[in-house]
Image (cartoon, rainbow, N blue to C red):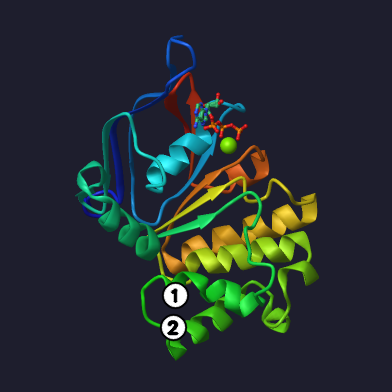
Amino acid sequence: MGIQAPLLRLEGLSKQYPSAEGAAPLYILKEVSIDIAQGESVAIIGPSGSGKSTLLNVLGTLDLPSGGKVTFGGRDLTQLDEHALATLRNSEIGFIFQSHHLLPQCTVLENVLVPTLAKGSPHGPESVERAKRLLQRVGLSERLSHQPGQLSGGERQRVAVVRALINQPKLVLADEPTGALDRASADNLAQVLVELNKEEGVTLIVVTHAPDLASKMQRVLELQDGKLVEKKG
Ligand SMILES: Nc1ncnc2c1ncn2[C@@H]1O[C@H](COP(=O)(O)OP(=O)(O)OP(=O)(O)O)[C@@H](O)[C@H]1O
Ligand SMILES: [Mg+2]
């Protein structure tokens, strides 16, 4: 394989939160530097409160770093304005959260198509085709007209996975995607994530407490005292 610019490059990334009443700020991320290539699958592990969600939010442009640099596909995110960040977030990044965040009054198919609406024009037939194909891929072709309340927890999370992929993002960020699932559903979702990572060539970064899920990723990075330590990869 030739030398290719990484999809994501973190250089000296830091994040601190101010604390109340003049106490010292909380230093959560301390000069984190790492490269992640297009198509890689990465688990981020670490104890509760170590900064995993903070890191994911910064990578997903939902939060700003306190210092350092994030380069995404050659663009320095710290130099983009809010409009440019929103466009990048909508078109190139997919999010999967611990709890699915589906719209309860919309059907499965409608939920999956929500991110395509952010582009400003109504979604075309190719979006609907892709949505149906991906829903079939994750075993939900018989559930297109169901509402989230009529699905099992694992099924809802699979809908959330398809929604994250609908715009063909370069990067999918998942924060504890199996956290609310039983063992069998968690295994099933982990398998779906791994297969879609391979089939779609999408870069996958998963925050997880589940050793099974972490071990399915090519790389495992652990947050320890504000630093990312490579455990596997
Ligand atoms: N907006 C905020 N203001 C102040 N402190 C915050 C804020 N958000 C997070 N923190 C603190 O930063 C630390 C890291 O939080 P974060 O949510 O990133 O942890 P985490 O590794 O995702 O934990 P968990 O595994 O429990 O989800 C925590 O100690 C938290 O209290
Ligand atoms: Mg968290």
Q: CA distance from mark 1 to mark 2?
A: 6 Å
Q: Position of residue 185 (x, y in %)?
A: 75, 57
Residue 233 visible from this viewpoint: no
Q: Secondary structure at mark 2?
A: loop
Q: Dot 1 surroundings within 10 Å: few (below 14), some, or many (20 or more)?
A: few
Residue wearing tag 2: 123
Residue 167 vs 61, above or below: the answer is below
Q: Which mark is residue 117?
A: 1
Of the pair 59 and 23, the residue shown nearer to us: 23
> Can you tell which mark lies on residue 75?
none
Q: Please indicate, yes or no, whether residue 90 appears anywhere in the rendered image.
A: yes
* Closer to the camera in the image, 46 or 55: 55
Residue occupying image coordinates x 62% and y 58%: 101
Which quadrant contains ligand 2?
top right
What amino acid type should be assigned to the residue bearing mark 2? His
Q: Quadrant of the C terminus?
A: top left
Residue 118's spot in the image, x, y percent? Answer: 41, 70
Front position in the image: 78 or 177: 78
